């Protein structure tokens, strides 16, 4: 499960669409039955908020952020304290590669 954050609406929509695409299991790429998806439980534009962090902590989701400014100090402390995983990307293909790792 992931929460997707992006810098702009025009960026957010393709990221969400990419999450909905099936991923092949790299250990058995010929087996189409092992295809899986990433579940997007929330998405938004702009910086990471306290609500994003609490939702991620409650659901066990990872924050996947694309071209979003690093969290403010109080949010960094909260992320660390609640042990919420956050991944930030500036390159679209790095975002996609990381999604593939999340489904394994």
Image (tube, rainbow, N blue to C red):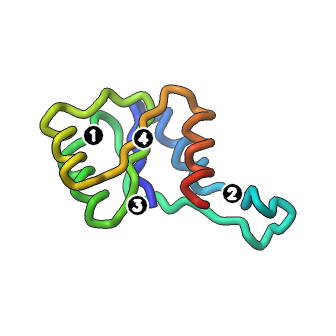
Residue farthest left in this picture: 74
Separation of marks 1 and 2 at Cα, in angstroms: 27 Å
Q: Given contact means CB atoms under 8 Å apart, are the residues at marks 4 and 1 in contact?
A: no
Q: Residues within 10 Å of mark 3 (few under 14, many from 20)?
A: some
Describe the element under mark 4 as helix, strand or loop. strand
Give left or right: position of 26 versus 41.
right
Q: CA distance from mark 3 to mark 2?
A: 18 Å
Please state which of residues 14 and 37 is positioned toward the viewer in this rendering: 37
The quadrant of the picture occupied by the C terminus is bottom right
Q: Earlier in the sequence, mark 3 or mark 1?
A: 3
C-alpha span from label 4 to label 1? 11 Å
Q: Which residue is mark 2?
A: 23
Helix, strand or loop at mark 3: strand
Q: Quadrant of residue 76?
A: top left
- Nearest to the eye among marks 3 and 4: give it: 4
- Disc 3 designates what residue? 41
How far across and down, in percent of the image, does residue 2 sit?
Answer: 43, 55
Q: Nearer the viewer, mark 2 or mark 4?
A: 4
Circle 2 sits in a helix, a strand or a loop, which is it?
Answer: loop
Mark number for residue 38?
none
CA distance separating discs 3 and 4: 16 Å
Circle 2 crowding by C-alpha within 10 Å: few under 14, some 14–19, many from 20? many
At x 83% / y 68%, what residue is drawn? 31
| Mark closest to the chain's N terminus, 3 or 2 | 2
Which residue was labeled with disc 4? 87
Q: Earlier in the sequence, mark 3 or mark 4?
A: 3
- Residue under circle 1? 48
């Amino acid at each position: 499960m992931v929460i997707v954050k992006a810098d702009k609406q025009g960026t957010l929509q393709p990221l969400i669409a990419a999450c909905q695409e099936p991923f092949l299991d790299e250990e058995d790429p010929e087996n189409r039955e092992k295809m899986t998806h990433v579940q997007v439980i929330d998405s938004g534009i702009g910086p990471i908020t306290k609500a994003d962090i609490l939702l991620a902590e409650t659901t066990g989701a990872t924050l996947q952020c694309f071209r979003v400014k690093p969290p403010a100090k109080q949010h960094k402390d909260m992320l660390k304290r609640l042990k919420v995983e956050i991944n930030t990307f500036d390159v679209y293909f790095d975002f996609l590669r990381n999604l593939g790792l999340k489904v394994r």
